[in-house]
Amino acid sequence: MKRYIKTAVAAACVGGAATGASASVITGTTYQVEQTGAFDVSFVSQSAGWTGSLYFTGAEVGGIMHPADDSDQYGIGQFLFDNHGTAPGHTVSIGEFEQGTVLHFAYQVFRGNKSNGNIRYVLRTDSPNDLNQFGWKEITPVADSMRTSTLHIEDIVGSGSDYDYNDVRANVIARAVPTPGTATLAGFALIVGCSRRRPKRA
């Protein structure tokens, strides 16, 4: 992923609240960076019979999509994790992005086990036809994060779906990135502090 992907404001779509058990999950919207930082994606849970894989597909800046580098043979973008066999808390870094950038994700659904390579379909947040399969819920930031949002995915499309948005859940965690000046000052303060604690020689 090219790290110069940064500036400009890209408006996120306006979504509505999902029904049923996930009434607080907002669907029909993308993820927009509110504050410049470094971003991680952490697996939370899954409740799906079908096997699926989550990907980070890239960053949209000023309406222009900058694809993430492909990390496997499927050509979707950066592979994050599978819904089956991934331990809760497994975390992957996707890079640093500036305010206004829209981050996009995809979810690839397989027929049977992933090892057979038989793909049902791929759901993408950059596709208007797929956007309602994704939902977002803001939660209390974890640890030292600026913002934590939970991505909820519904993996069944159409009339057969229950739209409970619990087939996959993953946290997108935004963390502050020190500016070069701040980092330099912090390092200088650390050096000064250490030098002051040195014992005087007799």
Image (cartoon, rainbow, N blue to C red):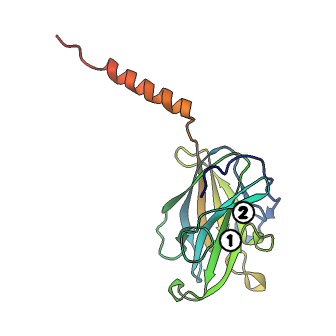
User: Which residue is painted at 53% across and 86% down in the image?
Assistant: 113
Q: Which residue is mark 1?
A: 165
Disc 2 to disc 1, C-alpha distance: 8 Å
User: Which residue is painted at 40% across and 27% down in the image?
Assistant: 190
Is the N terminus in the top left, top right, bottom left or bottom right quadrant? bottom right
In the rendered image, residue 56, in percent from the top left (x then y), is placed at 62, 64
User: Which residue is painted at 53% across and 89% down in the image?
Assistant: 116
Specify the label residue 175 is tagged with.
Answer: none
Name the foreground residue: 198 vs 145. Answer: 198
Q: Does residue 29 lie above or below 193 as drawn?
A: below
In the rendered image, residue 61, in percent from the top left (x then y), is placed at 74, 53
The answer to whether residue 196 is left or right of residue 32 is left
Cβ atoms under marks 2 and 1 closer than 8 Å: yes
Which residue extends farthest top? 202
In the rendered image, residue 11, in percent from the top left (x then y), is placed at 81, 53
Which residue extends farthest left? 202
Name the foreground residue: 129 vs 86. Answer: 129
Q: Earlier in the sequence, mark 2 or mark 1?
A: 2
- Label 2 crowd (10 A; few <14 / some 14-19 / many >=20): many
- Label 1 crowd (10 A; few <14 / some 14-19 / many >=20): many
Q: Which residue is mark 2?
A: 25
